[in-house]
Image (cartoon, rainbow, N blue to C red):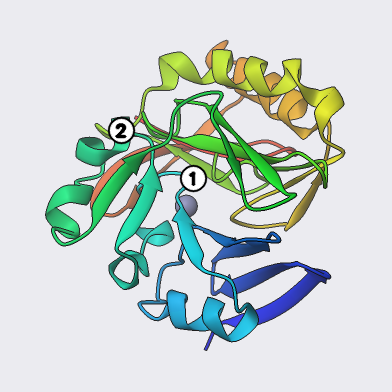
Amino acid sequence: MPEIIKIDNNTWRIEDGFVRFFLLEGEEKAALIDSGVNCPNAHDIAKELTGKPIILLNTHGDGDHTSGTGGFTDIYIHPSDYDACDMKNNYPNTSMIPLNDGDIIDLGNRPVKIIHIPGHTKGSVAFLDMAKRVLYAGDSVQKGHIFMFGTKRCPELYERSLDKLIAIKSEYDCIYASHDSFMLSGDYAEKVKEAWKKVQSGEVSYEMTELHGNSVKSYTTPVCGFYME
Ligand SMILES: [Zn+2]
């Protein structure tokens, strides 16, 4: 069973093994940010916590973030991940509503801004909880290893995406991550960018490791890690 932890009076984190997802409640509706790796009943879990109608906002389409998708009729996800993550085939009965860069979804006195940050996947987005000054960055900013191998990824766009988060750092005080440490400091995107640049320039050594049947390079830095081709 996932562990449910209340963060404040209208925000929860749901710890689903190695990944977590979040419930944000506004005055009119609530949003689940992702739905875990082993939670086909994510909608039911959220319904226990809020009486408001619940929408599903996806940081991206990877399987460890989308297990509860089938419990929703409408899900919000960036169009670049419809195909990249095979969402239409995996969830044929679900309608996908596009998340676009700069859109604001208001949950009722709780606006959430969409920031498209391709890199980890083509359709990765961050959600800025504007009133609470919290950034939900999915897998793109975290302390654990960030997957950057395979056809879903676009590492060539990742640094520019981190720059986008850094450019708006005056709008958030901290970052909530989907893996590893839950809360990161507001300057963590800058730290990840420095680590990424060091990996790109060959300053960080790697070990080969087996992951999902692939032989990949594992880079580890004090800030975060990367799995690469
Ligand atoms: Zn993930």
Disc nearest the viewer among 1 and 2: 2
Badge 1 marks a residue whose secondary structure is loop
x and y percent of residue 150 in the render?
28, 35
x and y percent of residue 228 in the render?
41, 32
Amino acid on which disc 2 is placed = Pro
Which residue: 50% across, 26% down?
Answer: 116
Which residue: 42% across, 14% down?
Answer: 156
Which residue: 24% across, 31% down?
Answer: 151
x and y percent of residue 36 in the render?
46, 66
Q: Quadrant of residue 191?
A: top right
In this picture, residue 124 sits left or right of residue 135: left
Residue indicated by mark 2: 79
The answer to whether any part of residue 78 appears in the image is yes
Q: The C terminus is located in which quarter?
A: top left
In this picture, residue 199 sits left or right of residue 64: right
The answer to whether any part of residue 219 appears in the image is no
Residue indicated by mark 1: 59
